[in-house]
Image (cartoon, rainbow, N blue to C red):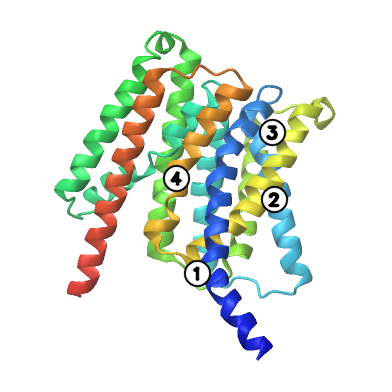
């Protein structure tokens, strides 16, 4: 009887409560990682920071599964892991980390949320039909971006600001390709182990690049502030939040689990203004709200279209 009562009480919490807590954690924690990256790259090369972060995070994942004697990926699974390690980590994470060296962390987070626009555009060029609602969402999101950048017109004169924008936008495009590739080539392999392998592989690529180009510094010259930022990015950003993210994806509807993408920029903008004195103007607040609304409409329209296709088939 006691077991039955316990199961009755805990079952709803386990089925919905824990996934919702995981989603709430992802929504807030990944917003804070933009600030940690901003703090870290103040004192060291950005790609080196990304390489160290991914190496340590990947080593923790892979080390855990080695101890557990988990089966290694086989055959075509390695192809997917290699491609995703380049798209999601070496390029997307590396470029976004590099980008916030030149632009405010809040602005980087807002640009980072623009992935649905690129997914819609890539899908269109792949022959998929874009609904009117999705086009409407793209228009709204673009209008919001124009409002945000209106405050930064003077900054566009600076080459470093322009470079930061290019890096940040490129990061969102590679993440969009990675997202579409994951949906198309999702392998039946442990997602956490795969994540660790992707991080390790991407860190090797980034270490090789920074070493070949001479864009790194000796580890002994990295100040404590950057090491603390790296520790936060590894522990919170790469390990705890990715575990929560995958758990939320596995237990919540896609429409609900994607909410984090709209909360992350809000957290980053507000904390950036509070901790780094980044300017929080009416244009950023209004433009950011309009942009996120447009992105939500795009995401909603594409998911509804996929459901209709599945029902017809």
Q: Which mark is residue 57?
A: 2
Q: Nearer the viewer, mark 2 or mark 4?
A: 4
Q: CA distance from mark 1 to mark 2?
A: 24 Å
Q: Residue at position x 65%, y 71% from top?
A: 72
Q: Are marks 1 and 2 in contact (CB under 8 Å)?
A: no
Closer to the camera, 191 or 228?
Answer: 228
Q: Nearer the viewer, mark 1 or mark 4?
A: 4
Closer to the camera, 236 or 226?
Answer: 236
Disc 3 designates what residue?
211
> Residue 312, image x and y in percent?
17, 73
Disc 1 designates what residue?
76
Q: Is residue 237 above or below residue 147?
A: below
Disc 4 designates what residue?
261
Residue most extreme to the left: 132
Q: Residues within 10 Å of mark 2 (few under 14, many from 20)?
A: many
Q: Residues within 10 Å of mark 3 (few under 14, many from 20)?
A: few
Q: Is residue 217 left or right of residue 167?
A: right
Q: Residue at position x 51%, y 67% from top?
A: 16
Q: Nearer the viewer, mark 3 or mark 4?
A: 4
């Amino acid at each position: 009887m006691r077991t039955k009562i316990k199961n009755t009480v805990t079952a709803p919490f386990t089925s919905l409560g824990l996934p919702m807590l995981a989603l709430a954690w992802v929504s807030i924690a990944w917003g804070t990682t933009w600030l940690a990256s901003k703090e870290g790259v103040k004192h060291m090369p950005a790609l080196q920071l990304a390489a160290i972060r991914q190496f340590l995070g990947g080593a923790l994942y892979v080390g855990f599964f080695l101890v557990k004697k988990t089966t290694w990926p086989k055959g075509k699974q390695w192809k997917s892991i290699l491609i995703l390690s380049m798209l999601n980590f070496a390029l997307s994470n590396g470029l976004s980390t590099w980008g916030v060296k030149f632009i405010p962390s809040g602005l980087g987070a807002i640009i980072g949320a623009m992935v649905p626009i690129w997914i819609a555009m890539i899908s269109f060029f792949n022959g998929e039909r874009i609904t009117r609602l999705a086009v409407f969402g793209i228009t709204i999101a673009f209008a919001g971006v124009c409002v945000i950048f209106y405050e930064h017109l003077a900054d566009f004169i600076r080459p470093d600001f322009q470079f930061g924008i290019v890096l940040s936008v490129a990061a969102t495009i590679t993440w969009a390709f990675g997202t579409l590739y994951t949906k198309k080539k999702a392998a039946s392999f442990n997602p956490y182990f795969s994540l660790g392998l992707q991080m390790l592989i991407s860190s090797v690529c980034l270490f090789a690049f920074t070493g070949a180009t001479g864009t790194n510094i000796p580890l002994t010259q990295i100040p404590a502030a950057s090491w603390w930022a790296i520790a936060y990015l590894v522990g919170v950003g790469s390990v705890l939040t990715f575990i929560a993210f995958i758990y939320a994806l596995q237990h919540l509807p896609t429409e609900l689990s994607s909410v984090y993408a709209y909360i992350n920029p809000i957290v980053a903008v507000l904390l950036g203004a509070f901790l780094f004195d980044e300017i929080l103007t009416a244009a950023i607040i209004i433009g950011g709200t309009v942009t996120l609304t447009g992105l939500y409409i795009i995401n909603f329209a594409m998911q509804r279209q996929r459901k209709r296709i599945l029902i017809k088939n």
